[in-house]
Amino acid sequence: MTIIHPPSTKEDILNYLLKHGQAKASELAQALEITPQATRRHLKDLETEDLIQHQSQQVGLGRPQHIYYLSKQGRDHFPSRYGEFAVSFLKTLTETLGEQQVGEVLRKQWERKAEDYRQRIGNGPLGERVSKLVKLRQEEGYMAEIHLFNPKNSCQSLKEGYILAEHHCAISEVAESYPTVCGHELEMFAEILPDCTVERTHWINKGEHNCGYLIQAN
């Protein structure tokens, strides 16, 4: 007989933080429909297990609020076994062909992917193309979202823009061992959106909670 275990509240918290990047205890309690006391208890346990971290944020004259987010160990809690194979395969290629040849292989792979993306995204309005790009990334295992870019002050450009956020990297293990693939990814986005400027705003490899790209029309 198969025993089906009920979902874990701690797992729900980890999944929420993976998707949203960060959250306050009150937000988690409301989203997961559990009491604030239970939420704080789970958060304390998860911090003890080194799966999450927090930073304090001062709001007004009250007590600082804790903002929680996943630690690197917490991100590793969402394994991709095919990533282990990919890293091992690339190491074997490097030993056999050398770093320069492997770098060329990775570059050609991203060029091929960019061409595939261009054909599938088409030539519609920027918002439509960006939405299609997010859907393609989601289908490949990236927890991708798109948000309108809102300049913080009038000195910034008012051109049409979007923030592409990827909360979970489908090739995180490869990116850790071969960070050049992230550079190719940035080049790929710029190539499939030739009428835009694409800049990296966040990078998981630098300890940030997601990979983020600012996409603005030229």
Image: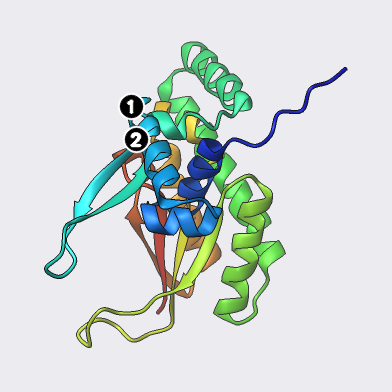
Residue at 65% from the left image edge and 60% from the top image edge: 135
Judge whether 93 appears above or below 109 on screen: above
Quarter location, residue 33: bottom right
Comparing 18 with 85, the one in front is 18
Amino acid bearing label 1? Thr
Q: Secondary structure at mark 1?
A: helix
Residue named by callout 1: 48
| Nearer to me, 105 or 81 | 81
Q: Tag 2: Cα neighbours inside 10 Å, few (<14), some, or many (≥20)?
A: some
Q: Secondary structure at mark 2?
A: helix
Q: Residue at (34%, 35%) from the top-left corner?
A: 44
Q: Position of residue 10 (x, y in %)?
A: 51, 37
Q: Which residue is mark 2?
A: 44
Q: Residues within 10 Å of mark 1 (few under 14, many from 20)?
A: few
Between 124 and 205, the one nearer to me in the picture? 205
Question: Do we see residue 49 in this rendering?
Answer: yes
Looking at the rendering, which quadrant does residue 49 occupy?
top left
Query: Residue 62, which numbered label?
Result: none
Q: Residue at x 29, y 83 (%)?
A: 157
Q: Is residue 6 left or right of residue 64?
A: right
Q: Quadrant of the C terminus?
A: bottom left
- Type of amino acid under label 2: Lys
Cα separation, mark 2 vs mark 1, equals: 6 Å
Q: Is residue 176 left or right of residue 86?
A: left
Q: Would you say the residues marked 2 and 1 are in contact, meaning their CB atoms lie under 8 Å apart?
A: yes
Q: Position of residue 116 (x, y in %)?
A: 68, 55
| Residue beneath the point at 47% across and 62% down | 164
Q: Measuring from the top left, give residue 161's x and y in whole percent.
A: 42, 77
Colour pattern: rainbow
